[in-house]
Image: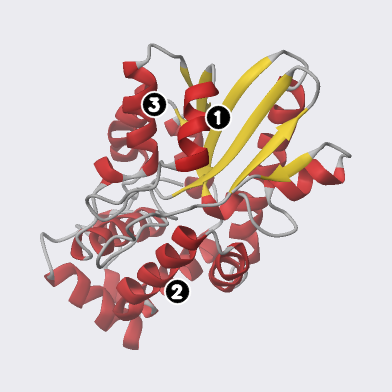
Amino acid sequence: MPFLLAACGTGEPTPKARPAMWLVADDDTRIYLLGTMHALPRGTDWDGDKIKAAIGSADELVMELSPAQLAAAGAEFQKLAPRSTPLAIDARLRGKALANYRALEDSGKGFGGDTLDDWAVMVLMGQRVAQDADLSGSDGVESGLTRQFQAAGKPIAGLETARTQLMLFETLDAPTQRALLTRAAEGADDAVEEISALTAAWSRGDIATLERMINEDVDAVPAARRAIITDRNRRWSAWVQKRMARPGTVLMAVGAGHLVGSDGVPAMLAAQKMTVTRVQ
């Protein structure tokens, strides 16, 4: 998702990225499922070959958030992020986690973490890692797709609202939020290298490596996996099944982590006896 699982990268961009894409089809409906990275190194070339053809043939684009909802996300974050009572970061994190948090905070403007919920601090840490890795949201897949579909005058829709997406974190219980924050802080010193490896796997269309890396991260906090990955994948799979009742061609672009593994959207659709084919 755009705020946490940025699925972005660092270093020199792959000259010709070939991210994984699937096609769900019947006699009169085609829905392409493209795994995205929300931020990428500037100049990354990801929309060639079969993705270009899918963009050209699609009647509409569906993403996690519509452009209007993405624009509203900052204001929603400001509403939901503050704690009712401030709590010092030193009282939340210890040892390596606290040291890494402080180092990340010192790399730029402070987070104001004492006044924010654990989940919100984690989100800001993720954004700082992307900044330190010299990533660009405007070079991410969603931004590129938005420009192309707007230029072609084709509609763009979203599967969620900004508030709904942020509430996934806001409604996590306190121990789960603390576990997520602690894990993010403990791994902050290696975050740029991890993100680089994740991006390289995405660029190759290496779904086995993507699955392994994502599972290692989210499986450490099972309650978060259910809320952030599995339950949303079920809702999105149901959306695809319903949309198949209407003719046309759709490009559905969501974070790459939602399309891999046994609880990924393609696997869920295949389990419902739908025809799902990997096309790139």
Name the residue tied to disc 2: 183
The residue under label 3 is 69
> Separation of disc 1 and disc 2 at Cα?
34 Å
Q: Taking 25 as reference, is 167 left or right?
A: left
- 127 or 19, nearer to the observer: 19
Looking at the rendered image, the disc whose residue lies closer to the viewer, 3 or 2, is 3
Q: Identify residue type, mark 1.
A: Leu
Q: Vertical placement of 188 versus 2: above or below?
A: below
Is residue 160 visible to us here? no
Residue 16 placed where, x, y %? Answer: 38, 54
Residue at position x 38%, y 42% in the image: 141
Q: Where is residue 157 shown, x and y percent of the image? A: 49, 21
**For marks 3 and 2 on the same chain, the one whose residue lies earlier in the sequence:** 3
Question: What whole-number distance in Å separates the C-alpha atoms at marks 1 and 3?
Answer: 18 Å
Which residue corresponds to the image point at 26% horizontal and 74% vertical from the top-left?
101
Kindly identify the residue that appears in the image at 42 percent across and 73 percent down. Answer: 182
Residue position marked by numbered label 1 in the rendering? 251
User: Tag 3 or tag 1, which sits nearer the N-term?
Assistant: 3
Q: Is residue 110 above or below residue 258?
A: below
Q: Position of residue 80 (x, y in %)?
A: 37, 40
| Quadrant housing residue 143 | top left
In the rendered structure, which amino acid carries the disc numbered 2? Arg
**How packed is label 2: few (under 14 Cα within 10 Å), some, or many (20 or more)?**
some
